[in-house]
Image: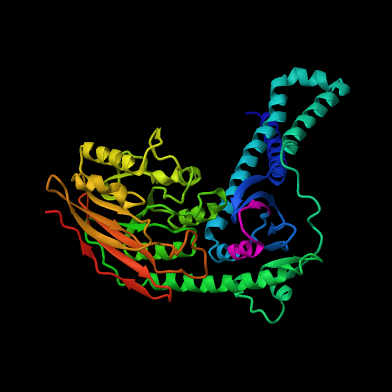
Amino acid sequence: MDRGRLLRGLALGAVWLVVTVATGLAIFLGSSRTVVLASHDAVLRPTLDGYVVIRTGPVLPDLRLSSESVVGADVTLGKTNADSTEQLVQRYAYIASQPEGQIAKVRGSITEMALDAAVRGAVIGLLPVAVWLLLGRARRRELAEHHAVTGVVTGVSLVMIGALVWSPWADEEPVGQDAGDWTTLADYLGPDINVPEEVSGVEVRTDVTTAEGKRLIQSAVDTYDKSRLFYESAAQKAATLDLREPEDGDTVVLLVSDRHDNIGMDRVARAIADAGGATAVFDAGDDTSTGESWEAFSLDSLTNAFEGYDRFAVAGNHDHGTFVTDYLDDQGWKMLDGEVVDGPGGAPLLGVNDPRSSGLGSWRDETGLSFEEVGHRLADEACASDERIATLLVHDTDLAEEALERGCADLALGGHLHVEVGPVRVLGDDGRTGYDFTNGTTGGAAYAIALGSKPRREASVTLVTYRDGRPVGLQPVVLQTNGIFEVEDYQRLTFG
């Protein structure tokens, strides 16, 4: 390659790089994404000011904190579901005390927007290079002699690039939301309120409309501190529990159920799972109170807590509609739908959503079925399997009753009752033994929603051990409302 050709190649590469970086950055800063965040429909926009700014609306003051990097985010909260402003602010406090799921969601969305902008910028950067190469040397010389034509071509190219960068179809920037001064949360609340060190970096935008929100934020800070301390202490204790150690060839799975939005228990459940040697998690449903999109924060938290685990789930009766199942499926959970799959440790696994979650009663493509009819179809599927079913994962173990009575499964796992029941030995019609076990509420839920600074009743998880493709034992772990753990004895399952 001669020197002149090398220089031209380097020049074209430089042009591509400059255009790519400039346009990619412009696209990135002009992009936005609608996500469900902190129980709101929210619009997320990237910034380069090093802050995450949360625009809460006309009632509460805006908040911001350092992103600890050059890249920041502007979050405008939209509609949500709450009975009162007080309830909404308390919800913010609970979510803020266990923020890992929401942080991961914002970081993931910003990363996706950056990658999208980089790809678009790289494609746009190729335009001037492609035009240069396609014209050829002779044509370039001719155009150079006609400056007017060259100007028109350049102008058209700039308009095309500008349109791609500007993206006029994108959402407009928030308007009129930058009034007021930023002050630290401690200064805003005053000397009578002890602000936890973990939120000392939070700043509040103050103006004439924020005085009424001060009382609500004072209450939220108190809730935040109590919730953070309770669940942080519980997670630390959980990591040191004296649990059964898995033997060679064992596979351990953690069973959770009836979380009902209590994201505080997620890190506690993960700590128990790690301490017990678990590598997978079963979710028996009722992760939400209503199954609506504002409860995505609960699903984000659960997914983040069990990152790296094999994850299997069914929907409960409170996970109404399709949002929960679709959302968990998108986040990598294996949603059981009435077909046998390979479960942890190679143990055949069969499960189905609670038919009451759809409001219609459904089995695959059938709708309008009763609870009993879905249970009958589940039993038929289990008994038709070439391999004996090791585990039936359902929300309510009554749904698996017929399959156990027909002798077609080793173990049925569920929740729904909010109290622990079993394991109950069931002798099948063919003389084979199965077991029925109901986990207590992992969220410590007394009602349909379990958000709070601590569980409202004892919170439960269960370690399920498998060997040679069959369940061989259960060990429930219970967190009392006073923060004390009760580790139950390991219960062996024998099948004769």
- The percent position of residue 304, horizontal first and vertical second, equals 48, 55
Q: Is residue 370 left or right of residue 262?
A: left
Quadrant of the image occupied by residue 402? top left
Residue 251 seen by the camera:
no
Q: Is residue 300 above or below residue 196?
A: above
- 3 vs 160, left or right, is left
Residue 84 counted in the magenta span: yes
As displayed, is residue 10 above or below residue 279?
A: above
Could you say which is closer to the camera, residue 101 or residue 213? 213
Query: Looking at the image, which is closer to me, 32 or 191?
Result: 191
Identify the residue at horizontal 80%, vertical 66% (top origin).
Answer: 207
Give the number of marks.
0
Instruction: State the residue at coordinates (54%, 74%).
Output: 226
Residue furthest right as drawn = 148
Could you tell whether 68 is left or right of 149 in the image?
left
Res. 244 in view: yes
Residue 139 horizontal/vertical position (percent) = 76, 18
211 and 159: which one is in front?
211
Part of the protein shown in magenta? 75-92
**Residue 439: where, in percent of width, then height?**
33, 60
